[in-house]
Image (cartoon, rainbow, N blue to C red):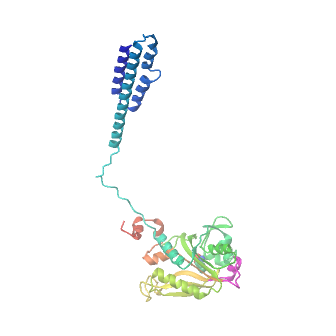
Amino acid sequence: MKERLHELKEEVLEKISKATDLKHLNDVRVAYLGKKGPITEVLRGMGKLSPEERPIIGSLANEIRAKISEKLDAKKAELEELAVQKKLEEESIDITLPGRPVTLGCDHPLTKTIREIEDLFIGLGYEVAEGPEVETDYYNFEALNLPKNHPARDMQDSFYITEELLLRTHTSPVQARTMEKAKGRGPVKVICPGRVYRRDNDDATHSHQFMQIEGLVVDENIRMSDLKGTLNIFAKKIFGEDREIRLRPSFFPFTEPSVEMDISCKMCGGKGCNVCKGTGWIEILGAGMVHPNVLRMSGFDPEKYSGFAFGMGPERIAMLKYGIDDIRHFYTNDVRFLKQFAPVDL
Ligand code: PHE
């Protein structure tokens, strides 16, 4: 029995020293020290031994078990250490390798222009309102004093989806939506940026899809002078303190009176050049006092309340501000064009 135990010991120690991974090592532990292992098997036969031999074999068996356990633990630690080393080697980083350049994006010039205008009006106490691009005929036209078959509907060739639904032709429907929400009580002070659509042929100054920013103020005692003052601040902040504004009479069904605003031409200082087509003035936006019918339809009492509204195209504003000669540049997104608006050299 003694020999058998020694044999087993040699056998296990050999296997332990040959184990190459933790799984393998654990298999050896289970096979030799487990309940069904050969050592336990040997000990089961102890009953047949003489009483003198029993304690000798018993302690030898315990000694051998302890030895095997010790070797297993040592080997386990060794294998674990090896695994860590291997992992470290595999994951080592070559810190001398030059990094890949990170390309920086920048805001689109239209986004920049819209934000700048938004910031200006937020500073004047306005809120930003939005409305859907797929609009009902009611909000796009009727609520703006443009009943069905009104000739002024031709001013804005529309993309109809159904009889009653269309892609909005301007941001003015947000005026009606905002007033409805206010439930007949002022003050209302909003600007509404967004996309609009018209059945135009695309060229250097037209696009079937473009942006507008609408402005609307409704309260008691709002007068034309408030509109003029607001537009004057806007023009000077966006185009420069040296710019003059001029209001010309115009027509929109939803404002009365209606005006168009021009700013003095920066190129020629008002003398006349090809940018301003010889007039010294450049048209910027449409505006006017909110028509009583529009106030009434959206739940405001025109006897008590009055208001002004304006609508402008940020593309046109960005084109004039940055000297861009073709509206299509905004949509074709050539990076050579876009990069010029980056805050740093890209
Ligand atoms: N909605 C008009 C347009 O698209 C612009 C406008 C807005 C005019 C508000 C007056 C008041 O042409």
Q: In which quarter of the view is residue 166 placed?
A: bottom right
Expressed as whole percent of the image width and height from the top left, the position of residue 47 reads: 46, 12
**Eyeballing the image, is 176 above or below 3?**
below
Q: Nearer the viewer, residue 114 or 126?
A: 126
Q: Nearer the viewer, residue 272 or 295?
A: 295
Q: Is residue 237 visible?
A: yes
**Eyeballing the image, is 62 above or below 171?**
above
Judged from the image, the quadrant occupied by ligand 1 is: bottom right
Expressed as whole percent of the image width and height from the top left, the position of residue 75 reads: 35, 31
- Residue 344 covered by magenta stretch: no
Q: In which quarter of the view is residue 212 placed?
A: bottom right
The residue depicted at 37 percent of the width and 14 percent of the height is 2
Count the marks: 0
Q: Is residue 328 visible?
A: no
**Eyeballing the image, is 168 above or below 94?**
below
Q: In which quarter of the view is residue 307 placed?
A: bottom right
Left or right: residue 23 versus residue 295 is left
Q: Nearer the viewer, residue 312 or 229?
A: 229
Q: Quadrant of the N terminus?
A: top left
The residue depicted at 68 percent of the width and 71 percent of the height is 138
What's the magenta region? 289-305
Expressed as whole percent of the image width and height from the top left, the position of residue 188 reads: 63, 78
Q: Quadrant of the C terminus?
A: bottom left
Left or right: residue 177 versus residue 32 is right
